[in-house]
Amino acid sequence: MNGAMVRIEDVHKRFGRLEVLKGVSFDVARGEVVVILGPSGSGKSTLLRLISHLDDLDRGRIYVDGRLVGYEERGGKLKKLSDAQASLARADVGMVFQRFNLFPHLDALANVNCAPMHVRGISKRRALERGAELLKQVGLGDKLHAYPSQLSGGQQQRVAIARALAMDPKVMLFDEATSALDPELVGEVLEVMKLLARDGMTMLVVTHEMGFAREVADRVMLMDGGVVVESNTPAEFFDRPQHERTRSFLSKIL
Amino acid sequence: MVLSLIHGLVLAFDVGVVREYLFKDIIVHAAMRTLWISVLAQALGVGFGIAAAVARNLKIPVASQAASIYVWFFRGTPLLLQLFFWFFVVPQNAPNDIEFGIFAIRHSWFVFSPFQAALIGLAVNEGAYMAEIVRAGIESIERGQMDASKALGMTNLQAMRLVILPQAVRVIVPPTGNEFIAMLKNSSLAAVISYNELLFVARGEWARNYKIMELVTVAGLWYLFFTSVFSVLQAELEARLRPEQERQGLMGILRRALTPPGDWTGSTGDRR
């Protein structure tokens, strides 16, 4: 599979009568950081949910590291994987949510440990070490035993990033990871994301942070009405947008 | 007329009989059987309820439909009828011994003692109510929790066990306490299939000595004792399940009481 980490082929998705994705195709190379921009309702979040197979797609195919996500192909037909098989595949895709979705009944370290221990079967001792290390990396080495309700939004989101990283994902998806944060807390989360990008993580980032897109992205995309309108390097995208839709979108937010 | 009725009741009431029977072995043992079958049936009922609610919530094929039918049937018919069903109908219609090689179905498996029939009847009935309570608990947990669990590679059942149910417990416990109190009282229905629980034994005594009022009082006092003790335990359990930072406990209340009025925010100020 030509080495693409994520390959999206003609993906369609509808919710009832509303067609949210109308044929989306693109590749994300290993280590590439792709930022997806677009108005709300453009299908960005839905696309991320399909890549981590939280929802079923209606048509098309998504591959992560050459493996079909959520389905197996038999004689040209797609067959849904069993819950256990699909779960295993999902473990390779890290996802960070707008609303953090930390587990409120577990402290920070247990949030990070939980899946490695129960899904990957890593020993408790190893998982504790690794969890503490990851929390230190995101700047929360002193909050190992804090519960989510005792942490600020920015801290919670950093725990959520550490939690996703603990599964050693092949790709990380960020679904408006800073949109629910107070403005002064956005920076600390973006900082962690920048470090990750610099370390060579493959990332798909849905965001409204133009500064982050310009500085960190290898490629910036605009989605609107369920299709990719424009996809280019940040410099080209922001300074010489090709499509009228991109120009009007940028003029409204910049 | 009402007055004369009360007058008659008071005159006829023999406190000595109540005192004699309240701690008599035969009554105490019956009370313990009431407590024991209630605890067992409630525990089993919680288990059935969780299984049915999870099967329905995750839409596990076959199990989900079976769970729906289970709840529909056992919530929709009287408990008394169900007790008759397990004690009389099932053994009557049970197959004769069937053997296939090393496997066998024995007729005797379907013939229940009063205790067994009462336990099955109470537990299966309770499970149908618990299924609804657990379902409400599961549905109270926001969808993002399931998404996050699955994104981390957990299977549906792992997500339920590790993430959803532990959080749902807080919603499930209060109505479960009410269910248990109802169970303590409903267990008296097992008297109709001759299980010798508290009311059955009390009735046996008054059939001999006609001290109906006194024996009803004795049984009533025992039920009140159990439900009162359990109410206190339930309040304690609910307090323990409150999230840590909201938990008060005796020390918390004391500290709060001793904090000067101007410093009231101090007790929650360390949240961030």
Image (spheres, rainbow, N blue to C red):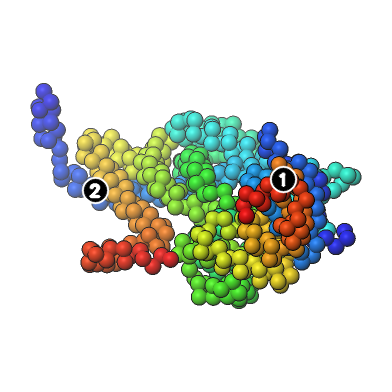
Q: Quadrant of the C terminus of chain A?
A: bottom right
Residue A172 on image: x %, y %: 69, 61
Residue A236 on image: x %, y %: 76, 58
- Quarter of the image for residue B243 reads bottom left
Residue A217 on image: x %, y %: 72, 63
Of residue A34 and residue B59, the one placed in the foreground of this image is A34
Front of the two marks 2 and 1: 1
Q: Amino acid at mark 2?
A: Leu
Label 2 in the same subunit as label 1: no
For label 2, the residue is B22
For label 1, the residue is A245
Label 1 neighbour load within 10 Å: few <14, some 14-19, many 20+: some
Chain ID of residue with mark 2? B
Of residue A249 and residue A130, the one placed in the foreground of this image is A249
Q: Quadrant of the N terminus of chain A?
A: bottom right
Q: Amino acid at mark 1?
A: Arg
Of residue A9 and residue B216, the one placed in the foreground of this image is A9
Of residue A179 and residue B214, the one placed in the foreground of this image is A179
Residue at 54%, 55% in the rendered image = A180
Left or right position of A232 against B7? right
- Which numbered marker is on residue B179? none
Q: Is residue A204 visible?
A: yes
Q: Is residue B250 visible?
A: no
Residue at 62%, 49% in the rendered image = A252
